[in-house]
Amino acid sequence: MTYLTSDFFARETTEVARELIGAEMSLGSCRGRIVETEAYTTDAASHSVMRPRQSTVMRQTFGYVYVYFIYGMYYCLNFTTDRDAAGAVLIRAAEPTQGLDLMRERRGIEDIRKLASGPGRLCQAFGIDLSFNGERIGRRIKVHNRNITPDVSSSKRIGITRATDLEWRFYDPSSPFVSR
C-alpha cells in the first residue's frame, strides 16, 4: 500500500474529496477507511471566508492537516487541497479497521458503527486535536491509496447554513459508517 503524495492533494478540492472515499487513513495503531467527506473552497460556508485568520493553513497549503475546534467540544479533521486556491476536505466519517480497542477506549462506547461516524467522533477515536494543525499529511496522519474503488454518491453538505445548494458531500452509499 502506498501513501498519497502532495500531488494528490494539489488538485481541485471537490475532486480530492470524491477520490478520498475508500482511501485508508492511519494514525499510530489506528486505521480506518474514509467513507464520507465534504469539500470547502471559497464558498460562503468555508472557513477561508468565515474565519480567515484561523484558516491560514487552508488558504496557503495543500497536503497539510487543518484541525479546528467547534462548539467548545469537538475537533474536526481536514486535509488542505488545491495548489491554486483555498481548499480543504473535511473528513466526516471512517470505517474503523485497526486499533478498535483503543478507539473504543477513547470514545467510551462499544458500537463500532459509532466510533468514527461523524467528524467529532472520528477525531476522538483517532486521538486528533489541535496539535495536528499545520502538519504535513504523512508526518503523523498518513493517507494510503485505496485498495478498492467504491461507488461514490454526493449530496448537500451537512450542518451548515450558508452555500447549502452545493452538493459537495461525498460518501460511500453502501457503508453503515456514514454519519447520516
Image (cartoon, helix red, strand yellow):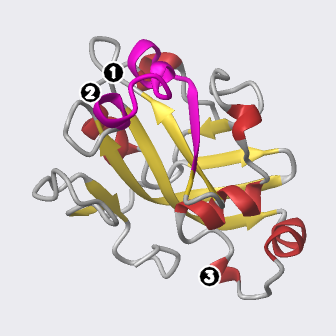
Q: Specify the segment rendered in magenta.
A: 47-69
Q: Is residue 126 above or below residue 175?
A: above
Give residue 45's position: percent from left, percent from top: 26, 46
Q: Looking at the image, is mark 3 or mark 2 earlier in the sequence?
A: 2
Q: Is residue 76 above or below residue 11?
A: below
Task: Assess disc 2: are there few (<14), some (14-19) or many (≥20) residues with their C-alpha within 10 Å of its C-alpha.
Answer: some
Please name whichever residue, 166 or 21, is drawn nearer the observer in this view of the structure. Answer: 166
Query: Residue at image x 69%, y 74%?
Result: 115
Give residue 169's position: percent from left, percent from top: 29, 57
**Could you tell me the amino acid type at mark 3?**
Arg
Please name whichever residue, 176 or 69, is drawn nearer the observer in this view of the structure. Answer: 69
Name the element at disc 1. loop
* Residue 64 falls in image quadrant: top right
Look at the image and tell me in which quarter the C terminus lies: bottom left
> Is there a contact, CB below 8 Å, between mark 3 and mark 1?
no
83 vs 12, left or right, is right
**Mark 3, residue position:** 113
Calculate the distance from the C-alpha at mark 3 to the C-alpha at mark 1. Answer: 31 Å
> Is there a contact, CB below 8 Å, between mark 2 and mark 1?
yes
* Residue 126 falls in image quadrant: bottom right
**Mark 2, residue position:** 12
Q: Is residue 84 above or below residue 137?
A: above
**Mark 1, residue position:** 82
Task: Assess disc 1: are there few (<14), some (14-19) or many (≥20) residues with their C-alpha within 10 Å of its C-alpha.
Answer: many
Query: Residue at image x 68%, y 36%?
Result: 142
Calculate the distance from the C-alpha at mark 3 to the C-alpha at mark 2. Answer: 30 Å
Look at the image and tell me in which quarter the N terminus lies: top right
**Could you tell me the amino acid type at mark 1?**
Asp
**Could you tell me the amino acid type at mark 2?**
Glu
